[in-house]
Amino acid sequence: MPNTKSAAKRVRVIRKKTERNRRIKSTVRTAIRRFREALAGGNMEEAQAKLRRALITIDKAVTKGVVHKNKAARTKSRLTKSFNKMAG
């Protein structure tokens, strides 16, 4: 339990930020999962659309400070590489 008013406020603020970050991370994971499912299904047009959506979602997470830019670059590279491998 927080002992001071400022500590209580920090608890509230952190809880709110944690919920926001969790929501953004979940959105990123869902976009990546949908891309991988489309890729496994073999529909390349759908997979390309899902890849584009996943890349945008990852970039948004970076701008909000939820994901580190290097991790985002690595993830985007791996997703694109897997798409190119299946397409080519």
Image: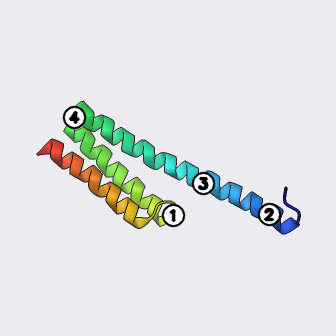
Q: Residue visible at 26% across and 34% down?
A: 40
Q: Secondary structure at mark 3?
A: helix
Q: Secondary structure at mark 2?
A: helix
Residue nearest the observer in this picture, 24 or 85: 85
C-alpha separation, residue under disc 3 versus residue under disc 2: 17 Å
Q: Earlier in the sequence, mark 3 or mark 2?
A: 2
Q: Secondary structure at mark 4?
A: loop
C-alpha separation, residue under disc 1 versus residue under disc 2: 22 Å
Q: Where residue 84 sits: x, y (%)?
A: 17, 49
- Residue holding disc 3: 20
State which mark lies toward you, 4 or 2: 2
- Residue holding disc 1: 64
Q: Amino acid at mark 4?
A: Asn
Residue 75 falls in image quadrant = bottom left
Q: Residue visible at 35% across and 49% down?
A: 53
Q: Quadrant of the C terminus?
A: top left
Q: Is residue 41 shown above or below 80?
A: above
- Residue holding disc 2: 9
Horizontal side of 17 relative to 74 (left or right) equals right
C-alpha separation, residue under disc 4 versus residue under disc 2: 50 Å
State which mark lies toward you, 1 or 2: 2
Q: Quadrant of the N terminus?
A: bottom right
Q: Residue visible at 40% across and 45% down?
A: 31
Horizontal side of 57 relative to 5 (left or right) equals left
Q: Where residue 81 sits: x, y (%)?
A: 22, 52
Q: Earlier in the sequence, mark 1 or mark 4?
A: 4
Q: Amino acid at mark 3?
A: Arg
C-alpha separation, residue under disc 1 versus residue under disc 4: 32 Å
Residue 43: image tag: 4
Q: Where residue 35 sits: x, y (%)?
A: 32, 42
